[in-house]
Image (tube, rainbow, N blue to C red):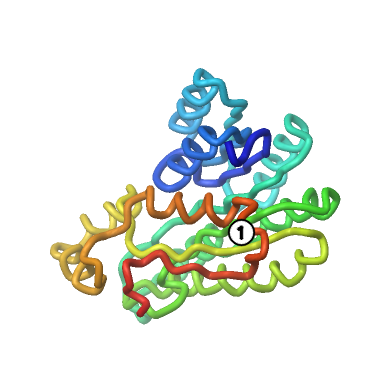
Amino acid sequence: MRFQDQVLFITGAASGIGKAAAQEFAKEGAKLLLADIQVEEGKALAETLRNAGTDALFTHCDVANYASVQQAVALAEKHFGRIDIGLNNAGIGGPMASTRQLELADWDKVLAVNQSGVFYCMKEQFRLMEAQKSGCIVNVSSIAGMRGLPNQLAYTASKHAVIGMTKTAALEGARYGIRVNAICPVFTQTPLVDKLFASVEGIDQKLLRTIPLRRFGEVEDIVNAITWLCDPSSSFITGLALPIDGGQSV
């Protein structure tokens, strides 16, 4: 029970990595505020966790909207009194398109969710954590935040930004006992990646050949890294952008 009675705020909590992380933290004793735009899925997850004995709430939250993020964090503050861990996981992929063909609306949407959304969440999480003089934040970037990814300019730009924001926030948060790290997964078996694979025939096998361990990530691989970064045994780690990529970045 590494996270007994700690309060975890998760965005993108209704599916994929967020859902798996919520389930694992619940097993470890955490209290959860689940935030997502997928209302039915989020409510169902919260109910399942409550039935298993976890103090869990769901709230609709569009991370691209600052007021929506403020409301979600305020709910966590009202119900739990604090936030110990922030997992800023919500993200979108955007269409496959070259730089020349990328539509401005698609650029704006991807950056609004993946980049501004992380900023909005950290801004509000810092408000509580600075007062507490403690806290841990994990931002979900991508291996695309550490390299180029053809035909995904907006996604790549947003994930690079997450790493830069993580490093800056880590320097700012250190004096308050706040640690900020990022994870950089390679293609992981989630609905978001399944959608990408379905959009371009044969792309999954092409991408698989770029991973030395010859498999895609599983959500358990990512969740294990998240819980490790939040564990007290990692208390001397901050500002890290951790690749979880089967050796691809090597």
User: Where does residue 100 sit, x and y in percent of width and height?
Assistant: 36, 81
Task: Residue 117: name its quadrant.
Answer: bottom right
Q: Does 85 sit left or right of 89 as displayed?
A: right
Q: Does 80 sit left or right of 233 as displayed?
A: right
Image vertical order of residue 41 relative to residue 113, above or below? above
User: Where does residue 20 sit, x and y in percent of width and height?
Assistant: 43, 41
| Residue neighbourhood size for the residue with mark 1, other residues' Cα within 10 Å, grouped as few (<14), some (14–19), many (≥20) | few
Image vertical order of residue 140 relative to residue 9, above or below? below
Task: Residue 77: name its quadrant.
Answer: top right
Of all residues, the one furthest to the top in this rendering is 51
Query: Residue at the location (59% across, 33% down)?
Result: 29
User: Where does residue 13 sit, x and y in percent of width and height?
Assistant: 50, 41
Task: Residue 162: name its quadrant.
Answer: bottom right
Find numbered disc 1 in the image and state the secondary structure of the residue it sits on: helix
**Amino acid carrying mark 1 in the image:** Ser
Q: Does 5 sit left or right of 182 as displayed?
A: right
User: Where does residue 58 sit, x and y in percent of width and height?
Assistant: 58, 31
Q: Nearer the viewer, residue 191 or 116?
A: 191
Residue carrying label 1: 234
Query: Residue at the location (49% across, 74% down)?
Result: 157
How many numbered tags mark residues here?
A: 1
Query: Residue at the location (50% across, 63% down)?
Result: 183
Of all residues, the one furthest to the front in this rendering is 233
Q: Which of 246 and 12 is in front in this view?
A: 246
